[in-house]
């Protein structure tokens, strides 16, 4: 059911994992035994591990890495396809990102995202994302759909930047 002191992801083998938020009664009971949920940052697999000491569970499932990539956001339902929000992608995880921009997009808006990592010649395209937060500096997006090929390239960026076994 749980592994002893295991931090590497049992599904994909990476060391890019981190302590995850608790959910439900079972996690709280296991927490009393210092058995904690861990989230793989590259394949999203969730597993439990025996820590042997008390820790505070974080509120986030995914670490966001700091980046500076030019980005374009397009509302999906814009019939003209002409609305383009330009900005800078400032942080990134497997499940979402933040875009610094002075332009406005409403909360809950469905968008497509394109950004240009320094590592690649071609931009990464996120087919579906939703505006989940807004602040003076920009917007927070949660990814809802992306192609496997794009997810692979996204993982490679994260793999280079994420810490090992964050807790
Ligand atoms: Zn994994």
Image (cartoon, grey):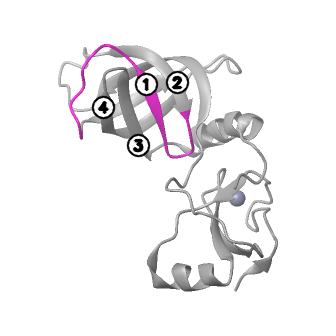
The answer to whether marks 2 and 4 mark residues whose Cβ atoms lie closer than 8 Å is no
Range covered by the magenta-colored residues: 92-108
Closer to us: 154 or 66? 66
The residue drawn where x is 37% and y is 20% is 137
> What element does badge 4 sit on?
strand
The residue drawn where x is 52% and y is 70% is 22
Q: CA distance from mark 2 to mark 4?
A: 14 Å
Q: Which badge, 1 or 2, comes first in the chain's sequence? A: 2
For this orientation, the residue located farthest to the front is 54
Q: Which badge, 2 or 3, comes first in the chain's sequence? A: 2
Q: How many neighbours does mark 3 have within 10 angstroms: few (below 14), some (14-19), or many (20 or more)?
A: many
Residue 53 location, x and y as percent? 74, 72
Residue position for label 4: 134
Identify the disc placed on residue 99: 1
Q: Which badge, 4 or 1, comes first in the chain's sequence? A: 1
Residue 44 location, x and y as percent? 60, 58
Q: CA distance from mark 3 to mark 1?
A: 11 Å
Left or right: 46 with respect to 96?
Answer: right
Left or right: 57 with respect to 160?
Answer: left
The residue drawn where x is 61% and y is 78% is 31
Q: CA distance from mark 4 to mark 1?
A: 10 Å
The answer to whether marks 1 and 2 mark residues whose Cβ atoms lie closer than 8 Å is yes
Quadrant of residue 158 within the rendered picture:
top right
Quadrant of residue 30 within the rendered picture:
bottom right
Identify the disc placed on residue 107: none
Residue position for label 2: 90
Give the foreground label among 3 and 4.
4
Q: How many neighbours does mark 2 have within 10 angstroms: few (below 14), some (14-19), or many (20 or more)?
A: some
Residue position for label 3: 142
The residue drawn where x is 74% and y is 50% is 16
Overall secondary structure of the magenta stretch? loop
Q: CA distance from mark 3 to mark 4?
A: 12 Å
């Amino acid at each position: 059911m749980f592994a002893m002191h295991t931090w590497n992801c049992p599904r994909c083998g990476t060391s890019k994992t981190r302590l995850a938020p608790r959910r439900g009664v079972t996690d709280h009971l296991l927490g009393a035994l210092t058995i904690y949920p861990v989230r793989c940052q590259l394949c999203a697999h969730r597993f439990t591990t025996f820590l042997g000491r008390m820790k505070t569970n974080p509120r986030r499932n995914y670490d966001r890495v700091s980046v500076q990539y030019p980005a374009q956001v397009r509302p999906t339902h814009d019939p003209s396809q002409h609305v383009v929000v330009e900005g800078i992608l400032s942080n990134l995880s497997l499940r979402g990102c933040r875009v610094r921009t002075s332009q406005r997009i409403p909360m809950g808006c469905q968008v497509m995202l394109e950004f240009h990592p320094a590592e690649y010649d071609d931009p990464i395209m996120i087919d579906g994302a939703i505006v989940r937060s807004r602040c003076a500096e920009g917007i927070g997006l949660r990814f809802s759909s992306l192609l496997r090929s794009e997810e692979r390239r996204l993982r490679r960026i994260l793999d280079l930047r994420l810490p090992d076994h964050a807790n």
